[in-house]
Structures are given as structure tokens and as C-alpha cells.
Image (tube, rainbow, N blue to C red):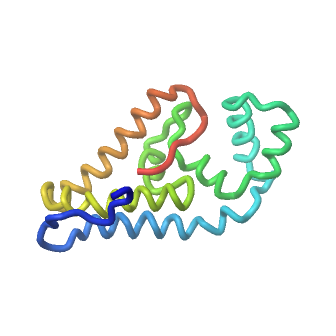
Amino acid sequence: MFLPIGDSPNPPGRPWVTFGLIAVNVLVYLALLPQSFRPASADDPTFGEYLEAVAEERHLSLPELRLLAGEVSAYDLVVFRHGFRPASPAPADVLTSMFLHGGLMHLVGNMLFLWIYGDNVEHRLGRLGFLAAYVGTGALASVGDGLLRFGSSIPSVGA
């Protein structure tokens, strides 16, 4: 099947950590969703830094940069502040970036994967072991991404 919706055999018991992680990811997305529809404020100190980073990364011309400036949402600035940026890595951003997503399909894909495989891994590792593995592999993914994109000011997001 192209899009799996489950697996079998399912382990006994309720995968509470898996449910909790899915809930936190969805709640963070829903809480920040209104920011996606609100234009960013040019008065926000992060606005200029964001434009500079994107212009440098994409080699934008001045007309392209002006066009981009009119399209920046408040959510873009939230992601820029709290996503993991290899050029200026912050320990807190390693954690917060795991709960930010680049859009609805990014969230759905990640949560579908977590729904299908999380219960099996949680059953095998135990609740605390699974939570540690989730956070640990998310942190390692951020660091690995940082090594691959060393010096980039564009943030990465998603677990």
C-alpha cells in the first residue's frame, strides 16, 4: 500500500508517549497556524535578519528580495527564531525545532510515521526509553543536518 495506515501485530497496551508526542506536535502546529496567515511586521528585529539569510542562501536580486519581503509571514519569523540554524546553533533550538513543521503535509507525514512505528518502538524500549530515543534521535538529526549545511542561516524543522 502506498500510504500505510497501520501495522500488525500491534503490541499490547496503550502507547501513551506516542499519543502524547503526536498531541504535542499537533497542538504546537495548531497554536502557531494563525501566524501563517498574518504578515510579518517589518518592525520585528528578526525580519531583517530573516531577509538577509534567505537572500544570501538563495542569491536573490533586489527585486526578488522586495517580493520576498512582502510575502514573509509571522510564522516564518517564528520558525527562523526557533528552528535549528547551523550558522548559529542553540541548544534550545535543537528541541524546539522538533515540534515545528514546514506545513500541514510535513506534519501529517511525520505524525503518520510516528503513529505507525511509535507504538512498536515504545513497546520495545519502554516509555522513558522511547521518549529519550525520540529526543535523542531528533537532536542527532539536527546536528547531522547542521554538519551537512554547515554555516547555513536557514533553519531546519521537524522531528
Name the residue located 74 percent from the left edge and 47 percent from the top edge.
Answer: 47
Residue 44: percent from left, percent from top: 75, 52
* Furthest residue in direction right, as rendered: 63
Does 61 sit above or below residue 136?
Answer: above
The N terminus lies in which quarter of the figure?
A: bottom left
Report the number of discs: 0
Name the residue located 65 percent from the left edge and 69 percent from the top edge.
Answer: 34
* Furthest residue in direction bottom, as rendered: 14
| 135 to the left or right of 94 | left
Does 24 sit above or below residue 106?
Answer: below
Residue 117: percent from left, percent from top: 26, 57
- Pick the front one: 115 or 80: 115
* Image-quadrant location for residue 66: top right
* Image-quadrant location for residue 39: bottom right
* Furthest residue in direction front, as rendered: 1
| 133 to the left or right of 82 | left
- Pick the front one: 9 or 94: 9
Residue 109: percent from left, percent from top: 43, 57
Residue 50: percent from left, percent from top: 70, 42
Does 154 sit above or below residue 107?
Answer: above
Does 153 sit above or below residue 45?
Answer: above
- Pick the front one: 139 or 57: 57
Name the residue located 22 percent from the left edge and 68 percent from the top edge.
Answer: 15
Name the residue located 40 percent from the left edge and 33 percent from the top edge.
Answer: 144
